[in-house]
Image (cartoon, rainbow, N blue to C red):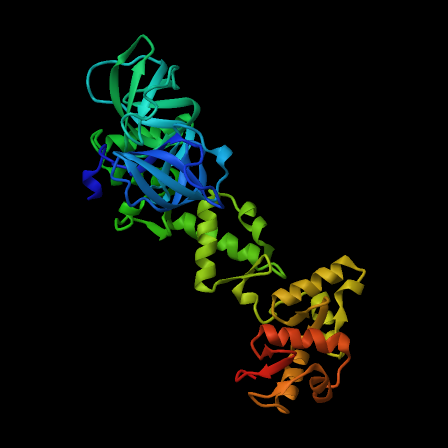
Amino acid sequence: MAEQRINRINISCLEILDNSEQGEGGKFISILCRSRGEDSSGFTGQAVLLPAGKKLTVRKIEKKREDEYIAVLKGIVRSDLKRRQVLVPLSYAVSAGKEAFFLLPSSKERLEKGNYFVSGGLYPEYNGENAKPSAAVTLHGRVASFRFFYDFPLVPGAKYFIAEETNRDLRTPVTLVYPGKLNQKESSRLADRLLKYGGRPSLKAIYSIILRTDSMVHIPDFLLGENFDGSIRSGNWIIMSREYDRIRNAVLKRSAAFGGVPEKELSAQINGVKPAILQIIEELIDRGTLVKRDGYILNGEREGGKSLSPMASKLLEDLKGEEEGVSLSLVSNPLVADTYRALVRLGLVKKLEGEIILHKERYEMLAKTLFSRIKAGDELDLGELKELLPLSRRLLIPLLEEMDKEGYFEWKGDKRVVLEKG
């Protein structure tokens, strides 16, 4: 299927006609759109607004007349929506940018370097009404580099049309073969790879060329069943095996730091395409190789307290003797406080309400003691629980609240009912 779609990519998208409210208002935004490309009647789910590149959700669409629809949107503000912008499903893996490389037709007609009007890509008429040239074009044989004057939707394998300023009616079809910027050496390699396909690469071949050029490529859903030699798939990302291993090893090394790495910082610490790195991180979390806890990413191998720092080991040992725990709010040394928080993330200590740090073994011993004295179905108020577990209110109340969270009790009026879990 993919081999047959070269230059005939039909994208289901919605062009914004009117960004004013089309419904009764409320927490969602409704706008008037025109269907472009394939039938848009089933267009719901995650989408991207082009050329702005903002992601949002299309909750539903309702047909109004002919090819016009009212689209109900979530995850975007109305001021971000403009006429002639286009909503495209994320499944097509379409991006926007200011630089790209195109394959020119094999005809003897020679194009000159200069500024050109550019249309098409998402659908044949896209940008067709623009009054000014869209891009500066530089020729490299049958390959041309385009430098757009504004963000432009980039669809690998799609057909675009270019026209000179002096003769806008004469449109030449071109095919986008690489979305982005390349240096002279890289662009020469791109041209060589295109020549291997006789100047007529299939859609899969175009994505394969991008993969070999960048070591990774973001593919649309309709290519997910295709095989790309020497690569690993992670979500919709196809990544060369060596590059995948490099990123994976870097993620595991960084996340092995004591207490983990802040989730928002991990991808920034690794060289590469950020969306692809984030996809690999999510994949490793799904597999259990990484653990996400309290805004941090931890290497799963660090669970259980392997390779603790000397300070962490001492704090953990000292905490065994603190029957009432340690109040984190009273710890004046920031390094000590951060170490306690890291021990919490590692699951070696419990952090109770009121910033009380309690050794995990102490918590488990108190729970075991309490539940040796009660049974499922018992209804107990705070006074009765204090008699069964004589602790200070400072510790008892947050301890019971933690047990509530873990499903040991449920509330019935002003009493706790013991559940089977206990």
Quadrant, the N terminus = top left
Above/below status of 352 relative to 245:
below
Q: Position of residue 97 (x, y in %)?
A: 43, 30
Which residue is nearer to you in this view: 86 or 118? 86
- Judge whether residue 181 can be spotted in this image: no
Q: Residue at x 56, y 68 (%)?
A: 303
Quadrant, the C terminus = bottom right
Q: Position of residue 420 (x, y in %)?
A: 52, 85
Which residue is nearer to you in this view: 252 or 273? 273
Q: Residue at x 38, y 50 (%)?
A: 241
Which residue is nearer to you in this view: 244 or 115? 115
Q: Residue at x 66, y 67 (%)?
A: 343
Q: Quadrant of residue 85?
A: top left
Q: Residue at x 34, y 43 (%)?
A: 61
Relative to residue 273, is residue 265 drawn left or right? right
Q: Position of residue 257 (x, y in %)?
A: 61, 58
- Judge whether residue 302 can be spotted in this image: yes
Q: How many marks?
A: 0
Residue farthest bottom in this picture: 373
Above/below status of 336 relative to 369:
above
Residue farthest front in this picture: 24
Q: Quadrant of residue 22?
A: top left
Q: Position of residue 89 (x, y in %)?
A: 35, 42
Relative to residue 311, is residue 133 drawn left or right? left
